[in-house]
Image (cartoon, helix red, strand yellow):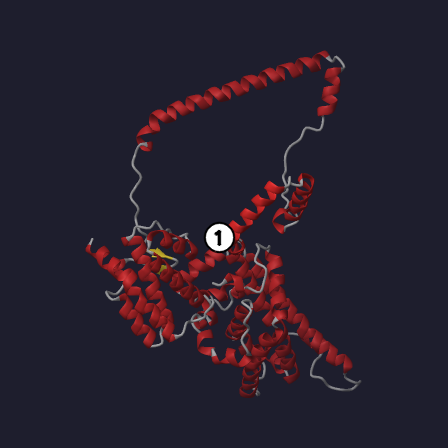
Amino acid sequence: MQLERLSVALRPRGGWEALDLGFQMARGSWRPVWGTWLAVYLPAAAVLHVLFQETLWIAPLVLWWLKPVFDRFVLHVVSRAVFGAPPTVAEALRAWREILQPGVIAGLTLFRLDPARSFNLPVWQLEKQTGREASARRGALGRRMRGYAVWLTLLCLHFEALVLISLGLVVALLVPAGGQTGFEFSELFKGGGADGAARWGWFDSACYVAAVSLVEPLYVAAGFSLYLNRRAILEGWDIELSLRRLDERLRIPKAAAIACIALALACLAGSPPPVFAADKSAKQEIVEVLKAPEFQQSRERLAWRYRGERSKKEERDGGDFWGNLGAFLAEISQALLWIAVGIGVVVLLLVARRYLAPFLEREPDPYRPPDALFGLAVMPESLPDDVAGTAARLAREGRLREALSLLYRGALSVLVHRDHIPLAEGDTEGDCVRAAREALPRGGADYFGRLVAAWQRAAYAGRLPEAGEAQALASEWAPHFAPRVAEGGAQ
């Protein structure tokens, strides 16, 4: 994931602040967001109302049930707009196959009534996770943010109801006396059943479509913002981006650095340094650094504090016998208590050294490669004999995501089984790249970095590479990893 292209400021946010950021993201890209929503939602609404014109109340019910399908188009636009490249309406519509896979059936059946569906939708659509992997991923992401996603659903549900009633009331108030709008405020609170269904008319459907079209894109954008914020907290995106910027700032050419040092030495030899000016400049620089957001954090701390200390001291100074005696005994008791604690700690250390020595002298267990990393199986037996050839064939067939997944899994399998690089399930892609740079030659490390970058774009941003790029990655895989796979199999 190319974090430097994000159009939003990366920093850990609270749940409500993350939801507000999602609303701002939808407002900032309102043309493609609402344009794509209306291009998909309005034709579907028109077709359903024509099909069910005899029983008109069924049409909005079906539209409500199909919300997860329409939400996918909004998420496609917002997820690319956050990287500064929002697609046009035509581009979003042409990508309908990519948008609707996977998880559409599950979203319309098992998880249709999930109150946190806007927060979980990116796991299916953007990360392409399914089955147990998707369930584990949703559990990891939702430990601290699911509650905010549930509140978002409740709030947007009430907003839709308010907009629906408000539209009907506004139009009813503007119609001249004696006119008919099809909307009666008193009818909303009457009983349902067949009589209530028969009262649903074309004007009611128009208000419902307008209310959903106004609120639903905001709902999707806010859920995606909550998802982004949770991933930024878990994976430390803000720290990684700050380190990248610091690394770019510190990349000074050696010749320029040497020239600056020589010039500074010449200046120091020619005249004494301006001590006071330097001190003033340093103070100003420190003040500017302390104004950064990182130093503006505060922490609340609760502690017990004795409020009668002053009066107790005054009594002691005034010659109170019993007060002085009590203070003296308290100090002696405190000293004896600390001595007893010290003796107890020494005794515990001696006992621990005696009984725990056999366990402490044991050699650490040898490294055992994991069976899976990031939800991907990396066992050698789970891979084909010819990883590069199989990946190239998948790329020619247009199965680009599967080709990248196979190359990535094969490379990870080589790193953990042949090179014995201690990778764990909690490591990130960045950790794998850094470990590969230390264990592989320069060419292999550069290739692995490009492979990881292509996989991240495909897995997290839904941006598949061209077929030629995937085939090129497959052709370059064997010189760096195929011999290691063979040797590891021989062992």
Q: Position of residue 367 (x, y in %)?
A: 30, 46
Q: How crowded is mark 1: few (under 14 residues within 10 Å), some or many (20 or more)?
A: few
Residue 195 sits in quarter: bottom right
Q: Can residue 192 be seen in this view?
A: no
Give the residue furthest to the left: 490
Q: Mark 1 points at which residue?
A: 254
- Comparing 335 with 65, the one in front is 335
Work out whether 408 lies above or below 262: below
Identify the residue at horizontal 74%, vertical 77% (top origin).
170
Give the residue furthest to the right: 177
Q: Is residue 388 visible?
A: yes
Work out whether 373 lies above or below 104: above
Number of labels in the image equals 1
Numbered disc 1: secondary structure: helix
Residue 440 sits in quarter: bottom left
Q: Position of residue 466 (x, y in %)?
A: 40, 74
Identify the residue at horizontal 72%, vertical 20% (top origin).
313
Q: Position of residue 251 (x, y in %)?
A: 50, 54
- Comparing 276 with 96, the one in front is 276
Residue 161 sits in quarter: bottom right
Looking at the image, residue 297 sits to the left or right of residue 4; the answer is right
- Comparing 157 with 454, the one in front is 454
- Comparing 458 with 438, the one in front is 438
Identify the residue at horizontal 36%, vertical 26% (top origin).
353
Q: Where is residue 55 in the image (x, y as percent from the top left)?
A: 57, 84
Amino acid type of disc 1? Answer: Lys
Identify the residue at horizontal 51%, vertical 77% (top origin).
92
Work out whether 82 lies above or below 197: above
